């Protein structure tokens, strides 16, 4: 896990043209998406260094909760009984494993840059033009200034946040673009969403943890 300094990020929704400022405390973020070997707890699994995909938001939250308990940490995320996960809770003071918020994700992706991407696209991201139409092992391309690999491209990454409950109900945000996307989708500010049960072959997740008081 890498230490991400606190700061402020302005998150923008290009569809509605809304923007909002978020102040962030320091947090920890994994240097790359969760791999198949880590998720399955099997280093001998086929293609162990590929990012795990076909993972729903619910799958990712359950993984974080189970791994927190296994590691003796207080879970930061809890699911309730609602099928759309509208009763799921996040405790930012808990030190257990969790998904990043989308503000944390975008802030970490930019790593202090004000550009749409934290580097030249082909040097930092697997996308439709260079991926050979397949997912790639994590960490092969250049990291951003804070040492984070694959923030752009390879696989989209689930975030904690609801997208817009008034319009989309329980749909959750994912960020970053994937191996089959065109360059327009591979920007730090690009927001996508789907139901928390949604699974697809270019969508995974990255682990975060809080560092403040328990």
Image: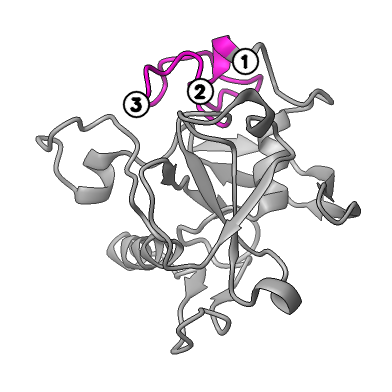
The CA span between labels 1 and 2 is: 9 Å
Q: Give the range drawn in magenta.
A: 122-151
Q: Where is residue 75 in the image (x, y as percent from the top left)?
A: 45, 70
Could one spot residue 163 in this view of the protein?
A: yes
Q: Position of residue 11 (x, y in %)?
A: 82, 48
Q: Which residue is rendered at x = 53% and y = 13% of the image?
A: 142
* SS at circle 3: loop
Which dot, 1 or 2, sits closer to the camera? 2
Which dot, 3 or 1, sits closer to the camera? 3
Q: In this view, does 117 lie above or below 214?
A: above
* SS at circle 1: helix
* Residue of label 3: 134
Q: In this view, does 115 lie to the left or right of 204?
A: right
* SS at circle 2: loop
The CA span between labels 3 and 1 is: 17 Å
Q: In this view, does 39 lie to the left or right of 147?
A: left
The CA span between labels 3 and 2 is: 9 Å
Farthest residue to the left: give it. Answer: 44
Q: Is the magenta stretch mostly helix, strand or loop?
A: loop
Please tell me how crowded label 3 is: few (under 14), some (14-19), or many (20+) other residues with Cα within 10 Å.
some
Q: Which residue is rendered at x = 64% and y = 34% of the image?
A: 185
Of the image marks 3 and 2, the number of the one nearer the N terminus: 2
Please tell me how crowded label 1 is: few (under 14), some (14-19), or many (20+) other residues with Cα within 10 Å.
some
Farthest residue to the bottom: give it. Answer: 81
* Residue of label 1: 121
* Residue of label 2: 127
Q: Where is residue 146 in the image (x, y as percent from the top left)?
A: 63, 25
Is 201 part of what is drawn in magenta?
no
């Amino acid at each position: 896990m890498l230490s991400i300094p606190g700061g402020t990020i302005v998150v923008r929704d290009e569809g509605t043209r809304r923007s909002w400022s978020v102040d962030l405390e320091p947090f920890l973020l994994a240097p790359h998406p969760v791999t198949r070997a880590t998720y399955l707890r099997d280093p001998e699994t086929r293609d162990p260094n590929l990012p795990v995909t076909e993972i729903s938001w619910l799958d990712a939250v359950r993984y974080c909760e189970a791994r927190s308990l296994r590691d003796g940490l207080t879970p930061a995320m809890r699911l309730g009984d609602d099928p759309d996960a509208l009763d799921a809770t996040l405790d930012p003071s808990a030190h257990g494993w969790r998904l990043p918020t989308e503000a944390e994700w975008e802030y970490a992706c930019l790593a202090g840059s004000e550009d749409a991407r934290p580097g030249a696209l082909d040097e930092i991201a697997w996308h439709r033009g260079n991926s050979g139409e397949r997912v790639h092992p994590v960490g092969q391309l250049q990291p951003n200034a804070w040492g984070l690999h694959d923030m752009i491209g390879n696989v989209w990454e689930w975030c904690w946040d609801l997208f817009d409950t008034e319009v989309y109900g329980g749909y959750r945000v994912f960020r970053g673009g994937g191996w089959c996307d065109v360059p327009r989708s591979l920007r730090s500010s690009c927001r996508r969403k789907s139901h928390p049960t949604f699974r697809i072959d270019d969508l995974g997740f990255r682990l975060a943890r809080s560092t403040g008081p328990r």
